[in-house]
Image: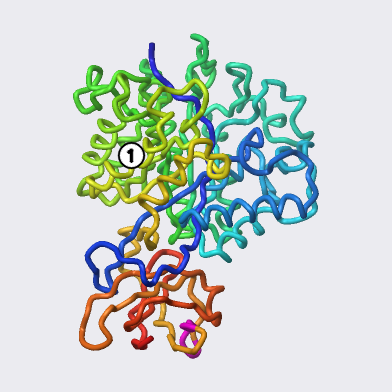
Amino acid sequence: MPLRPSRRLFLGGCGALALAAAAPGPAARAADTPERQLRGLWIASVEHMDWPPAPGLPEDRLRSAYTGLLDAAAALGVNAVFVQVRPTADAFWPSPFEPWSHWLTGTPGLDPGWDVLRFLVDAAHARGIAFHAWFNPYRVALHADPDRLAPHHPARSHPEWTVAHGGRLYYDPGVPAARAFVEQAVLDAVARYQVDGVHLDDYFYPYPTGGEPFADDASFAAYGAGSTDRAAWRRRNVDLLIRELRDLVRAVRPEAAFGVSPFGVWRNAATDPAGSATSAFQSYDGLHADSLGWVRDGLLDYVAPQLYWHIGHPQADYRTLARWWAAQTAGRDTLLWIGQSAYRAGAPGQAEAWQDPAELSRHLALNAELPQIGGDILFSARNLRADPIGAVARLAADHWRRPALGPLLPRLAGGTPPSPPRLTASDAGLLLSSGPGTRPPFRYALYHHPQAHGRTAGTLAAVLPAADAGRPLPVAAAGRYTATAVDRCGRESGASAAVRY
């Protein structure tokens, strides 16, 4: 039987790291080459998995629930959130293309009366957390009845764009007009909001459902150009979405990261020698998603495969898949982050390995042996708080205790960094501020130099949001301190003048 893990959303977010100036750590690094690591959290909106917690809540409840998630994520050490803002061909912003999401108000198309996405982005940025907008491209509804959609929903106006499958409604990826519409709907949010990334998950063509074929005979006849290989045609349709959307995003917001979190198995080696030593469901064949091809063709800034299996799983061993993905991204400009199944830890009915609080921590320990892996994203937000056996807390204590800057995309490394900040000492602690005549950065990085004099390598002591500027930062370790400014892309300035404390 093919293996497909259930898709449960886990809190995706990034948070500013608490000041830890005196914490001993690994070998000191130069101040201009700090450790960088993506520490992400998925925040899912569909079916109220993470946020909003229920339909139709008043604005103040929605705001406080979201900021509570962010604060919990920041305390854990998260530095990026991946928030689902278009779960079912709808919008968490006043879109001219699609109706307001019923996951917000309980009623399809009902305006909540405030700009939700602007708040979501601004609240994350105020905490020094990167905001990646998460879009599901083709899912229209978790039912198959167009009459239940908002009255002016595009799927009702263009039934020729849609296919009912498995009791749900989808846009047909094989219809060029539908694909172009999806791209423009996504691009509207990218152009209007200061998002740090555009994120797609594993849903392209739908997962197989009880042997039911995806009913795209009409689009294949109209747009298949005489092809006899429907699977190859479907993959080309998905490839076009990835390539076209990548190009549109870079044209409108070139500093935003564009990436995909695909199902964790591309193909099994028994099917394709290039595949992994697994025997699981194959996304290349089942979802028509050629994630390895996107990496090879340089279409993604990052890939975040969902490796939701434990170490030693008989069909899809985490160790095997982590090493396989590391090998595929080696020497390429596509960054590799791993999707981690925090929702499995301690959950009833899961394998014995998931009843061990150390399982997730072991995943990150294995990742540390693979330099291509630059971070992880936890699925999903509610597991950060529930954490029934303490597995998430264990992961953070073992691997996220020391601060880290977020990743820097290779294609942005040559950009202009921000200006160095000003660092001063007071009786109450260190004070950070932007340099004269310069705009505040996104974050500050504070470095500790243990010796009071001489040229010593600095250890990253804290990563702080710009909102901490002007607030005394108490420190516990003597020595010299320097600081750098970090922009939303992760570019870092030169160091400030050193101060002794």
Residue 293 location, quadrant: top left
**Is 389 displayed left or right of 419 in the figure?**
right
- Colour mapping used in the image: rainbow
User: What residue is rendered at 45% in x and 88% in y?
Assistant: 425
How many neighbours does mark 1 have within 10 angstroms: few (below 14), some (14-19), or many (20 or more)? Answer: many
x and y percentages locating residue 420 in the rendered image: 39, 82
Q: Is residue 183 above or below residue 70?
A: above
Q: Amino acid at mark 1?
A: His
Of 145 and 114, which appears nearest the observer?
Answer: 114
Local secondary structure at mark 1 = helix
Mark 1 = which residue? 363
| Range of magenta residues | 429-437
Q: Was residue 432 drawn as part of the magenta stretch in this picture?
A: yes
Does any portion of residue 353 appear in the rendered image? Answer: yes
Residue for point 45% across, 24% down: 5
Quarter where residue 274 is shown: top left
Residue 131 locus on image (x, y percent) = 53, 55
Looking at the image, residue 249 sits to the left or right of residue 459; the answer is right
Q: Was residue 448 drawn as part of the magenta stretch in this picture?
A: no
